[in-house]
């Protein structure tokens, strides 16, 4: 769940909608910023005419889940069931659903609704909905219900916010594409990164490893910029042509002014100026990592080279479908470590130590 949506919880009605409810759904939730995730039961609505009900098979673990479970962006509504990299099997559809039928494999990403009528929604940029997109968890639906995410057995979502997923790929490796995949695909496409471009990727975690794979597949020369010397071999296997250790000033000095584009995926406070200095004239640094603290930027770093510092949030529904279809065609999935749901708190600790290789995915069959 990205932080740029400053939806005003106080203005939305805290009522429970009168939708019919299914029997309780098993889930894992955090009850507060300092409590570990633990078993919990949630109510899901019975599918309405446009709804698709999914049995969740796999759910990726995004660093945003940790920011949100711990209220680091100060917008969490507790209890919170995180999870927005969802792949599942359709178990029921409403009578007006046309895109899905029972038995189909489908995905849900970071949002489950938006206003649908603003200029951005009409362009398919629902993530930038002028009213505010409805996040997959810890957000309020139009009905007033609070959304709950994918660390659960099933979910019910309007078909317009559900993605088609090829059943020809390993589904656990597809789940992270629903956030890590689209969040890196979208800016790379927006800035038309490809052949002849030098692309730097900062941070080899969930988003970073997808940026490497996608950047290389678009034809760019990719350099991994990492704090972890032991990730060099993996970076090259994932498609990086070069590797630089960002804690080694000499290695960075050699790359001054080198890149046309940099994607910054870092989740924690760090110095952006270090990376801006690596951009060539007219270079663009796209920030997708979302540390909770504001960044300090020395503007002369931008001025002296007409450089741009930009941000990008997930991707709209049409582009997410385009990305899933592209990855299916190219055989691109995420490199994952499958975990049981009971290991989720340990997995969070490993993510925080930059020790995920390169996305944890929960096997939801272990939620019993
Ligand atoms: P992740 O798997 O934890 O990867 C982050 C990587 O950043 C780490 O593996 C590490 O790579 C590097 N890193 C961590 N701490 C660092 C530090 N202090 N200084 C320098 N590098 C550091 O996280 P993720 O799931 O990819 O998510 C990354 C960020 O993107 C999070 O803040 C998340 O909330 C945000 N996000 C944003 C969007 C969006 O729409 N914009 C969508 C999803 C996620 P090395 O070991 O290689 O240094
Ligand atoms: Zn995410
Ligand atoms: Zn809208």
Image (cartoon, rainbow, N blue to C red):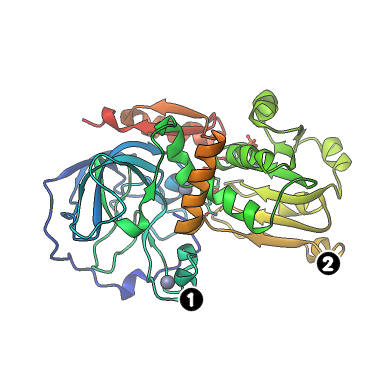
Query: What count of labels does the image hold?
Result: 2
Residue 109 visible: yes
| Mark 2 or 1, nearer chain start | 1
Q: Is residue 365 above or below residue 305?
A: above
State the residue at coordinates (67%, 30%): 235
Residue 6 position, x and y percent, is: 45, 68
Mark nearer the viewer, 2 or 1: 1
Q: Which residue position holds label 2?
A: 303
Crowd rating for badge 1 (residues with CA inside 10 Å; few <14, some 14–19, many 20+) = some
Q: Are marks 2 and 1 in contact (CB under 8 Å)?
A: no
Residue 302 position, x and y percent, is: 80, 63
Q: Give the numbered dot on residue 136.
A: none
Tell me if the residue at label 1 has its CB under 8 Å from ligand 3.
Answer: yes
Q: Which residue position holds label 1?
A: 119
Dot 1: what SS? helix
Cα–Cα span, label 2 and label 1: 32 Å
Residue 295 position, x and y percent, is: 65, 59
Tell me if 59 is positioned left or right of 367 in this view.
right
Residue 49 position, x and y percent, is: 19, 61
Q: Is residue 47 above or below residue 165?
A: below
Q: Is residue 302 above or below residue 337?
A: below
State the residue at coordinates (71%, 33%): 240
The quadrant the C terminus occupies is: top left
Looking at the rendering, which quadrant does residue 175 occupy?
top left
Return the residue nearer the eye: 179 or 324.
324
Looking at the rendering, which quadrant does residue 326 occupy?
top right
Dot 2: what SS? helix
Tell me if 193 is positioned left or right of 301 in this view.
left
Residue 289 visible: no
């Amino acid at each position: 769940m990205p932080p740029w949506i400053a939806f005003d919880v106080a203005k939305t009605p805290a009522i429970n909608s009168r939708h019919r409810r299914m029997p309780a759904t098993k889930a894992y939730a955090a009850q507060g910023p300092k409590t570990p995730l633990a078993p919990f039961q949630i109510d899901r609505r019975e599918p309405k005419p446009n709804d698709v009900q999914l049995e969740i098979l796999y759910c990726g673990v995004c660093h945003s889940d940790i920011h949100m479970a711990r209220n680091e962006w100060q917008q969490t509504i507790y209890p919170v069931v995180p999870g927005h990299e969802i792949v599942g099997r359709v178990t029921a559809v409403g009578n007006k659903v046309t895109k899905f039928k029972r038995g189909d494999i489908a995905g849900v990403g970071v949002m489950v609704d938006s206003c649908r009528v603003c200029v951005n929604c009409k362009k398919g940029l629902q993530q930038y909905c002028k009213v505010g997109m409805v996040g997959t968890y810890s957000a309020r639906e139009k009905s007033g219900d609070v959304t709950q995410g994918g660390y659960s057995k099933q979910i019910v979502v309007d078909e317009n916010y559900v993605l088609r997923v090829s059943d020809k790929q390993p589904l656990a490796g597809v789940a992270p594409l629903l956030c890590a995949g689209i969040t890196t695909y979208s800016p790379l496409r927006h800035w038309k990164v490809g052949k002849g471009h030098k692309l730097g990727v900062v941070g080899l975690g969930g988003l970073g490893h997808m940026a490497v794979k996608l950047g290389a597949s678009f034809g760019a020369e990719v350099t991994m910029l990492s704090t972890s010397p032991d990730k060099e071999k993996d970076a090259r296997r994932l498609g990086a042509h070069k590797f630089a250790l960002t804690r080694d000033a000499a290695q960075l000095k050699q790359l001054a002014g080198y890149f046309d584009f940099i994607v910054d995926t870092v989740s924690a406070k760090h110095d952006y100026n270090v990376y801006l200095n690596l951009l060539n004239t007219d270079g663009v640094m796209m920030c997708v990592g979302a540390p909770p603290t504001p960044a300090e930027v020395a503007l002369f770093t931008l001025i002296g080279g007409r450089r741009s510092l930009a941000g990008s949030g997930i991707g709209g529904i049409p582009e997410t479908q385009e990305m899933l279809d592209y990855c299916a065609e190219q055989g691109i999935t995420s490199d994952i470590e499958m975990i049981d749901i009971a290991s989720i708190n340990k997995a969070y600790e490993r993510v925080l130590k930059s020790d995920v290789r390169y996305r944890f995915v929960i096997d939801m069959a272990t939620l019993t």
